[in-house]
Image (spheres, rainbow, N blue to C red):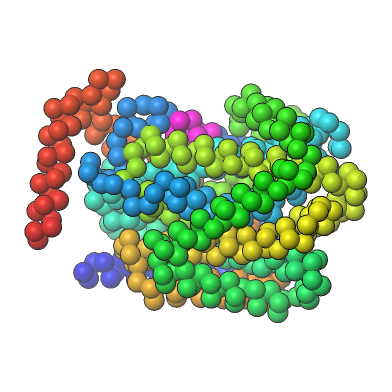
Amino acid sequence: MSKNKKHFSSVFIYASIIVGILVILGAVFPDQFGNISGAIGTWVTETFGWYYMTTFTFILFFSIFLGLSPIGKLKLGKPNDKPEFNTISWLTMLFSAGMGIGLVFYGSSEPISHYLAPPNADPETQAALAEAMRSSFLHYGLHPWAVYGIIALTLAYSQFRKGELGLISKTLRPILGDKVDGPIGDIVDVLAVFATIIGVAVSLGVGAIQINGGLNYLFDVPNNIWMQGVIIAVATVLFLISAWIGLSKGMQYLSNLNMILAALLCLAVLILGPTLLILNMIPSAAGDYFNTLIFNSLDPAPLNEQKHEWMQEWTIYYWGWWMSWSPFVGIFIARVSRGRSIREFILAVLFVPTVVSFLWFSSFGLTGIDTAQSVPQIFDMPPETQLFGIFNEMPWGIVFSIIALVLILSFFVTSADAATFVLGMQTAFGTLHPKNYIKITWGISLSTIAFVLLLSGGETGLEALQSAAIISALPFSLVVILMTIAFFKDAEKERKYLGYALTPNKKRIKEYEEQTKDEENDTNQE
């Protein structure tokens, strides 16, 4: 028990000190902090763009390989474990935590931006439209979910099948041995906690700004720091209630609500927008995406200045951002995926969110571009208000705008709820059931950090922490690579032992199941 307390204290204290220093610097010296962080972030994206692209591509194709290989037959848990959540709730929970709020805000604004400033084509042409859809698919398609998935897969396998604690550091035991129980393990866990805190705090601040922008556009609500503080306070109360209720009720119900509202909104846009164009562009853009997947996954555009600058602003930035979010989303997905086979897990995590993203960006992106071509002032709106400007030109626009605000707030709450669980889990020695007071402490801390940054630095402070998230992704990417190697080493060893191949060794499998059952009975008796 003393060891557990020591580990809890070290990870919690180290992460708190680092975040505290950043918050103080951002509050006292917002301009200098923003400039320095921005310069370092720019240097990272320009210097390591090739590394990010290679790493993401390797993880993607390695994930597909795992799903197709005999390793895919292994279960994330003991042989007799059953999934805790039904399949629909499971899918909605992982999707809501992963990038739900990003889809609502950037479903229209990102394709519009690419249409106005494409990577290769001339702006505002048919070629630019095709590139806009393909680029949006690339950023929200297979790549980010492969990174989320490999972390979740590795952690779930280590925790539920091997009996390790629910900490990222423990997944490295196959290659680092008992060193993961010491300072090296602490460093790994602090990196994960730090990335989660920074990513979520920035998300809460940006979400508050964007919700405020929508309320200002629709109802002329004041757009200022104090209104954003009220929005953060309301969202905090809601996600703390959800966190108190627990995953099986609060998070599950909210996630299901998210998907119902999102489905209704997407269906309405599909019907009221340029329906025939959308239906034709979905397979066309998807085919373009898959046809160019390998090239665009590996091309940092060293000989194409236009595309290179575009990639620094978009693709490389996204890859760093997704990497910085990956410990948070990966840990949460692992928590809700016990009892799934590796093959089922990979197929669901990779392809279900990707298909939804394709449908979403096709509907909202094409409707946005089509509407803006008739109402050019939409092109000039900031990203946080473009969606509401588009709805304003549609029948029942005010209804759709209100639904969008509710959906944004709901995604806001579910992401923060998941973050409080992950932070509680990582700072309470990997427990699957962190105490409510720990989750509430982290929830209040996240909201306070977000508001202090808005109060002290506004958008500058948030941009500085976004750069910090990009910077933190660089060392954590090394951890992800080590996790991948450690998982494959351990899983391949077990695959060979069980004789998993085209013709499984049924005798070995039966022996393993009986041995596992005996161990569970002994544990229950104790």
Q: Nearer the viewer, residue 449 or 258?
A: 258
The magenta region covers: 55-64
Residue ID at (14%, 45%): 517
From this view, report whether residue 511 is shown above or below residue 152: above
Asked where in the image residue 409 lies, by quadrant, the reply is bottom right
Residue ID at (38%, 43%): 153
Q: Is residue 205 left or right of residue 384?
A: left
Is residue 475 at all visible to an observer of this figure? Answer: no
Residue ID at (28%, 56%): 165
Q: Is residue 209 left or right of residue 343?
A: right
Residue ID at (53%, 54%): 96
Q: Nearer the viewer, residue 262 or 127?
A: 262
Q: Is residue 474 magenta?
A: no
Q: Nearer the viewer, residue 2 or 116?
A: 116
Residue 473 location (% of width, % of height): 54, 51
Q: Is residue 319 left or right of residue 373?
A: left
- All told, the count of numbered labels is 0
**Overall secondary structure of the magenta stretch?**
helix
From this view, report whether residue 451 is shown above or below residue 109: below
Is residue 428 at all visible to an observer of this figure? Answer: yes
From this view, report whether residue 207 is shown above or below residue 318: below
**Is the N terminus in the top left, top right, bottom left or bottom right quadrant?**
bottom left
**Is the C terminus in the top left, top right, bottom left or bottom right quadrant?**
bottom left
Residue 317 location (% of width, % of height): 65, 47
From this view, report whether residue 325 is shown above or below residue 363: below
Q: Residue furthest top?
A: 502
Residue 468 location (% of width, % of height): 60, 59
Asked where in the image residue 201 lies, by quadrant, the reply is bottom right
